[in-house]
Image (cartoon, rainbow, N blue to C red):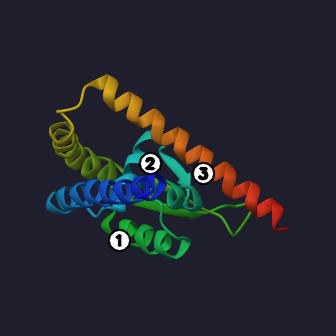
Amino acid sequence: MNTNVKLMVVFSKLSHTFLASLGKNLEELGMGGSTYPILAHLNEVNRAKTQKLGEVAVITSGSITHIVSKLCKLGYVLKEQDKGDKRIFWVEITDAGRSAYNKVNDEHIKYLDNLLNDFSENEKHDFTEQIKYFGKTIERKQNEKTEQNK
């Protein structure tokens, strides 16, 4: 098998297995896989644009609207339209949202630590840097191709 094809297959399997495992754990803890990164980001920054939350959770604008509405109904976030630009909405985490996130996060981090405890900190760091390098290189090449097609 061609090395590039093998890399594609192995990375795809790893990504699927890892994300499915994390998603299953979050579901068992009572939080959806898309909800967790949104609340995690808001827990860090307190307030963000819906567009940014979609980027963080790697979901479409239609999906982020649905998830934010659901989080509003749960009382986890507040949504407010920007005063200067009516197309923009800001989402802010509430105390209830912070509490729900913290409750799930502690258990999720334990699960993640257990999942990855066979790897040294150096191995995880090096792998992370390699993935970032691959991602940036592929993104740069995609942008170059897009520019050439204009």
Label 1 secondary element: helix
**Quadrant of the snapshot with the N terminus:** bottom left
Mark-to-mark CA distance, 3 and 2: 29 Å
Label 2 secondary element: helix
Among numbered discs 1 and 3, the one appearing first in the sequence: 1
Please tell me how crowded label 2 is: few (under 14), some (14-19), or many (20+) other residues with Cα within 10 Å.
many
**Viewer-side residue, 146 vs 57:** 146
Please tell me how crowded label 3 is: few (under 14), some (14-19), or many (20+) other residues with Cα within 10 Å.
few
Which residue was labeled with disc 3? 138
Among numbered discs 1 and 2, the one appearing first in the sequence: 2
* Amino acid marked by disc 3: Ile
In the shown orientation, is residue 47 left or right of residue 26?
Answer: right
* Amino acid marked by disc 1: Lys
Which residue was labeled with disc 1? 73
| Foreground label between 3 and 2 | 3
Task: Say which residue appears at 66% left-offset and 61% top-offset.
Answer: 82
Please tell me how crowded label 1 is: few (under 14), some (14-19), or many (20+) other residues with Cα within 10 Å.
few
Percent position of residue 47, x then y: 52, 49
**Viewer-side residue, 39 vs 138:** 138
Task: Say which residue appears at 68% left-offset and 49% top-offset.
Answer: 140
* Amino acid marked by disc 2: Leu
In the shown orientation, is residue 50 left or right of residue 150?
Answer: left
